[in-house]
Image (cartoon, grey):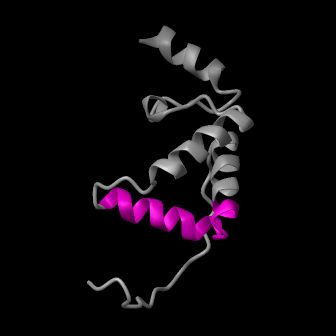
């Protein structure tokens, strides 16, 4: 594929749920780059699907600053371990039934 080739796509509206502070950082990063949130997420996912980091060093520094500003203390180690607020009661129940 050449870099200047345009790709016609069909976009759909989606209602994904996401951790609040993570979304704030993503929105701020999209705004910083004058992108829509959807465009930013598409770029991140396409890079990830190719096994590439979507961010340059200056962007990673900006993300670090935004995470601090919005109090986002999560990193990749938190993936698959996020629990919805208010769900702790059901977690305790699961642990005691094992």
Image quadrant in which you'd find residue 76: top left
Q: Is residue 38 left or right of residue 48?
A: right
The answer to whether residue 58 is left or right of residue 17 is left
Q: Which residues are magenta?
A: 30-49
Q: Quadrant of the C terminus?
A: top left
Q: Is residue 9 above or below residue 52?
A: below
Give the tally of numbered discs: 0
Quadrant hosting residue 92? top right
Residue 63 image offset from top left, x and y in percent: 59, 45
Q: Nearer the viewer, residue 65 or 18?
A: 65
Nearest the eye: 1 or 9: 1
Q: Residue furthest front?
A: 58
Q: Residue at left 50%, top 8%?
A: 96
Residue 6 image position (x, y, % from top left):
41, 91
Image quarter of the N terminus: bottom left
SS majority, magenta: helix
Q: Is residue 89 above or below residue 57?
A: above
Whether the magenta-drawn stretch holds residue 95 is answered as: no
Name above or below for residue 65 compared with residue 4.
above
| Residue plotted at (46% across, 54% down) | 55
38 inside magenta stretch = yes
**Residue shown at 67% from the left, 70% from the top:** 34
> Which x, y percent locates residue 93?
56, 15
């Amino acid at each position: 594929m050449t870099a200047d080739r345009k790709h016609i796509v069909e976009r759909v509206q989606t209602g994904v749920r996401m951790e609040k502070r993570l979304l704030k950082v993503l929105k701020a990063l999209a705004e910083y780059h004058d992108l829509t949130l959807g465009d930013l997420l598409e770029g991140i996912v396409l890079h990830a699907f190719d096994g590439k980091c979507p961010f340059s060093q200056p962007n990673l520094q900006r993300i670090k600053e935004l995470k601090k500003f919005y109090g986002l203390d999560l990193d990749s180690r938190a993936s698959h371990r996020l629990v919805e607020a208010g769900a702790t009661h059901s977690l305790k129940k699961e642990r005691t039934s094992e």
